[in-house]
Image (cartoon, rainbow, N blue to C red):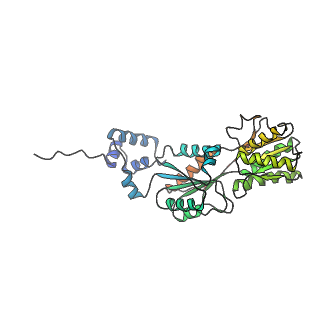
């Protein structure tokens, strides 16, 4: 009596035969490539379902050197990442773009040199297919090291002093200028700014836009600095009032700092906007429900995350990227605070 043959698991070739397509088309569908027609994709997915085909990820990784994982590295503390709406928006945008690709997102936080060293070893050790980085400070060596190690990398924002291969940013300088121009048209003449960190491109560019507008108007600057947190906006507002109690407008380089400043202004008896107009930057979910609702420069954080992920997917798949740098255009949203 012969041995009973155990049915073998379905193969890629069997899926291709059932779907009426080539083996390469099946591979592209499984790998999430956009270079497949909707009709072919539907036929392959139907064949996979009918045959009960399960891709052998471990074997495929050995052959293709792909892990189906991308990392998002945020150079900030855990508290900042989970407290501030900017990071939630970036993550939502990235996740949306990755949802149909089969790629998994790994979130990595790093601040200290020791954390960075461990992270660099992990990211260059064939554990991920690509890396997204945001909120980088200063002349950070990690992007160049990743690219040199053959790891496709896309940045959110352009750090000062770096020339990354690929990044997505907002025209921060123009957005800041829009905000200050609006205050000038309202007749404000003692316009202060709460600038962001100057070791970040976004901080440098938004301060430059503020200075552009005031220089053209022939007005003096009044600059204090924060770190993009609401607490730093509180501290900066007290400093502003001490340095120039007659300040009649504040442009803050992000919404949390603007909201912190508004708290102090109201506490110190300043009416918003009658005595002091306030403008932020981001158009976060908190802006329209502030008291009064916050005028702010709108930037699509989720779109930024989507475009970062889209660029990285193209680079991972070896596709030609026509424009590795994407600059999104902001616009001013006028509400009661200005």
Instruction: Residue 286: give x, y in percent of width and height.
Output: 69, 38
Q: Of 172 and 44, which appears nearest the observer?
A: 172
Q: How many marks?
A: 0
Q: Of 78 and 282, which appears nearest the observer?
A: 78
User: Which residue reaches farthest left?
Assistant: 1
| Viewport quadrant of the N terminus | top left
The residue drawn where x is 60% and y is 47% is 305
Q: Is residue 69 above or below residue 147?
A: above
| Viewport quadrant of the C terminus | top right
Residue 49 in view here: yes
Instruction: Residue 318: give x, y in percent of width and height.
Output: 50, 57
Quarter location, residue 335: top right
Q: Is residue 131 above or below residue 298?
A: below
The residue drawn where x is 83% and y is 51% is 213
Instruction: Residue 148: give x, y in percent of width and height.
Output: 54, 65
Instruction: Residue 51: give x, y in percent of width and height.
Output: 32, 41
Residue 325 in view here: no
Q: Of 286 and 300, which appears nearest the observer?
A: 286
Q: In the figure, is residue 292 to the left or right of 105?
A: right
The residue drawn where x is 43% and y is 42% is 41
Q: Is residue 189 above or below residue 200?
A: above
Q: In the figure, is residue 110 to the left or right of 138?
A: left
Quarter location, residue 50: top left
């Amino acid at each position: 009596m012969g041995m009973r043959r155990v049915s073998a698991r379905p193969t890629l070739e069997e899926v291709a035969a059932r779907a009426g397509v080539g083996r390469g088309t099946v591979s592209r569908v499984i790998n999430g490539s956009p270079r497949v027609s909707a009709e072919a994709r539907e036929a392959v997915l139907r064949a996979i379902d009918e045959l009960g085909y399960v891709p052998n990820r471990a074997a495929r990784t050995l052959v293709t050197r792909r892990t189906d994982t991308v990392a998002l590295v945020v150079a900030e503390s855990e508290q900042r990442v989970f407290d501030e709406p900017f990071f939630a928006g970036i993550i939502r945008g990235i996740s949306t773009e990755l949802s149909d690709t089969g790629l998994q997102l790994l979130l990595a936080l790093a601040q200290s040199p020791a954390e960075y060293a461990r992270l660099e070893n992990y990211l260059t050790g064939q554990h991920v297919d690509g890396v997204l980085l945001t909120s980088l400070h200063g002349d950070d060596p990690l992007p160049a090291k990743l690219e040199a190690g053959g790891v496709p990398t896309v940045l959110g924002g352009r750090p000062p002093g770096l020339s990354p291969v690929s990044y997505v940013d907002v025209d921060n300088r123009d957005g800041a200028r829009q905000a200050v121009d609006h205050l000038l048209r309202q007749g404000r003449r003692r316009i202060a700014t709460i600038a962001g960190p100057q070791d970040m491109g976004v901080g440098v560019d938004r301060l430059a836009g503020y200075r552009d507008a005031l220089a053209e108007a022939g007005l003096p600057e009044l600059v204090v600095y924060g770190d993009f947190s609401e607490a730093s906006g509180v501290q900066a507002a007290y400093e502003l009032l001490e340095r120039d109690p007659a300040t009649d407008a504040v442009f803050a380089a992000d919404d949390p700092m603007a909201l912190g400043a508004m708290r102090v202004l109201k506490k110190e008896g300043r009416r918003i906007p009658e005595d002091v107009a306030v403008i932020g930057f981001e158009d976060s979910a908190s802006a329209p429900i502030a008291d009064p609702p916050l005028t702010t420069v709108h930037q699509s954080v989720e779109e930024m995350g989507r475009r970062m992920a889209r660029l990285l997917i193209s680079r991972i798949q070896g596709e030609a990227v026509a424009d590795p740098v994407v600059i999104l255009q902001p616009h001013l949203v006028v509400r009661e605070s200005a």
